[in-house]
Image (cartoon, rainbow, N blue to C red):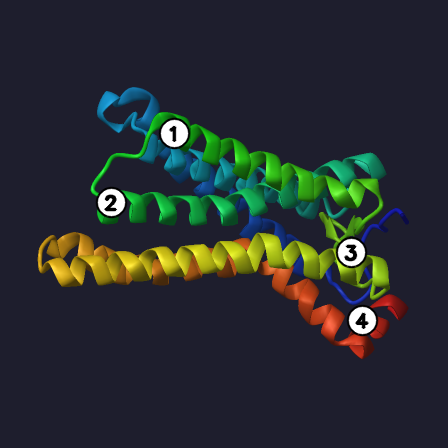
Amino acid sequence: MAEPGTLPTGFRELEVLAVGTVLLVEALSGLSLNGLTVFSFCKTPELRTPSHLLVLSLALADSGISLNALVAATSSLLRRWPYGSDGCQAHGFQGFATALASICGSAAIAWGRYHHYCTRSQLAWNTAISLVLFVWLSSAFWAALPLLGWGHYDYEPLGTCCTLDYSRGDRNFTSFLFTMAFFNFLMPLFITLTSYRLMEQKLRKSGRLQVPALIAKTVPTINAINYALGSETVCRGIWQCLSPQRSEQDRTK
């Protein structure tokens, strides 16, 4: 892995500082809002339920994404990556693991709401804990694979943060990306949309609970936005693999 220079070719200092400022605002906002969620769960006994445990897990994952953005913001404001190659690998792993945990956590919440409104029974603690453990262990597993040679973490073009190296169009990276996307993007997306769709149909047939029915219609839109943000790295990588000419241009820059 090549060490980044002071400023990457094609970027001006003002642009790098602008990116750092935006990332800093995003990171502080995310940490503050998700911190309120964690604080509310810890301080309010009524919120300490199995269903809210899934929400707590999602808040922790999003806090991890914000911390990752905070590191990127710091290096952007410094206009260089100060943590070396090992720091780049750690930063890539942490950011990818929390992004995957956020995506899978959204699917777990969707299933939990389907279970509550369609079976009319409370989610059990052992089920909620098992879901949370599965989300985090699965995310850590997939994020660790690039450290073991399937996939690769490297510097972003700006050189101030690290993620999957999408400029690689070889078979190793392509096989990792599409396999990972199937299990960590398509399957969670299917679970999320199916859960809310079934919940909406159930509530519509009952003719009751108008507020939850409204939630059932609007939450998939909110989750779609969350997917667009949380899985941006997945979509960008697929686009790179489907555009070999563009990937070749990126490698020659």
Mark 4: amino acid: Ser
**Horizontal and vertical percent position of residue 13:** 72, 57
Taking 236 as reference, is 57 above or below it? above
CA separation in Å, label 3 and label 2: 44 Å
Q: Under tag 1, what secondary structure?
A: helix
Residue for point 36% across, 26% down: 125
Q: CA distance from mark 3 to mark 1?
A: 33 Å
Q: Residue furthest left?
A: 208
Quadrant of residue 193 within the rendered picture:
bottom left
The earlier-in-sequence mark between 3 and 2 is: 2
Left or right of residue 67: residue 44: left
Q: Left or right: 33 with respect to 243?
A: left
From the image, state whether disc 2 or disc 4 is nearer to you. 2
Q: Is residue 48 visible?
A: yes
Instruction: Say whether disc 3 or disc 1 marks the residue closer to the N-terminus.
Output: 1
Count of marks placed on residues = 4
Say whether marks 1 and 4 touch (CB < 8 Å).
no
Please give the label number shown on residue 38: 1
- Helix, strand or loop under label 2: helix
Q: Amino acid at mark 2?
A: Thr
Residue visible at 30% across and 59% down in the picture: 198
**Residue position for label 4:** 247
- Alpha carbon distance from label 2 to label 4: 48 Å
From mark 1 to mark 4, how far is it between C-alphas?
A: 41 Å
Where does residue 213 sit, x and y in percent of width and height? 19, 58
Q: Count neighbours of disc 4 (C-alpha within 10 A) and say few if under 14, some if 14 to 19, many if 20 or more.
A: some
At 84% from the left and 57% from the top, the residue drawn is 172
Could you give the CA–CA distance between mark 2 and mark 1, rounded to whole angstroms? 28 Å
Q: Which mark is residue 119?
A: 2
Q: 39 and 11: which one is in front?
A: 39
* Residue topped by disc 3: 165
Across and down, in percent, residue 228 comes to 50, 61
